Image (cartoon, rainbow, N blue to C red):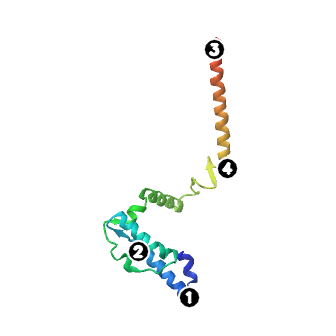
Amino acid sequence: EIQKLAPKANTPGLRARLNDLKDVLALLSGLEGRSTRDVDRYLKLVDPVLAGKQKFDASLSKDAKGPVTAEQIYVNQKVSDLISKAEMEQNDYRRGKKPNVFFGLKKRYFGTQFGVFTFNTIVLIASTLGLLVLLHWILRKQLEVRRS
């Protein structure tokens, strides 16, 4: 919301709202508390400011000090590391071709590019046919055993 508001903050009301959002962002980036419950309480105090229902009041969070940070509670370090690694690989200028992104619209296998829908359809049909052939073979073997 800050990025949407910044270019058009030409009235005093919009500038005040932008400053409130910046203050909340600064508070949230270093939010601390004595316990997870304290951190959660401070977050709930900030919600009306984010919704635009009240002005930011720094005195509400003046006691926000302690060993527990909001980052420790709400940030998954493993996911952050995976995202950072993916961004580095994507921005690596030494790679001649683009990486094969898991959620991409196109997939590259053996130098050939496939659409995800096409590839998934081929995999589903091939695996279904393969399982049907396997089932047919198993049932034929059972019939041969019973005949003899």
Number of marks in picture: 4
**Percent of width and height locating residue 77:** 42, 58
Q: CA distance from mark 3 to mark 2?
A: 77 Å
Dots 1, 2 in contact, CB < 8 A: no
Vertical relation: 138 (above or below) 61: above
**Percent of width and height locating residue 47:** 47, 72
Q: Is residue 32 left or right of residue 22?
A: left
Query: Closest to the observer: 119 or 90?
Result: 119
Q: Nearer the viewer, mark 1 or mark 4?
A: 1
* Residue picked out by circle 2: 27
* Residue picked out by circle 1: 11
Q: Quadrant of the C terminus?
A: top right
Name the secondary structure under disc 4.
helix
Dots 3, 1 in contact, CB < 8 A: no
Amino acid under label 3?
A: Arg
Ranked by sequence position, the earlier of labels 3 and 2 is 2
Query: Closest to the observer: 96 or 46?
Result: 46
Q: Quadrant of the N terminus?
A: bottom right
Who's the residue at 44% across and 80% down the image? 56
Name the secondary structure under disc 2.
helix
**Percent of width and height locating residue 68:** 34, 65
Q: Is residue 17 left or right of residue 132?
A: left
* Residue picked out by circle 4: 117
Q: Is residue 37 left or right of residue 148?
A: left
Q: CA distance from mark 4 to mark 3?
A: 44 Å
Dots 1, 4 in contact, CB < 8 A: no
Name the secondary structure under disc 3.
helix
* Residue picked out by circle 3: 146
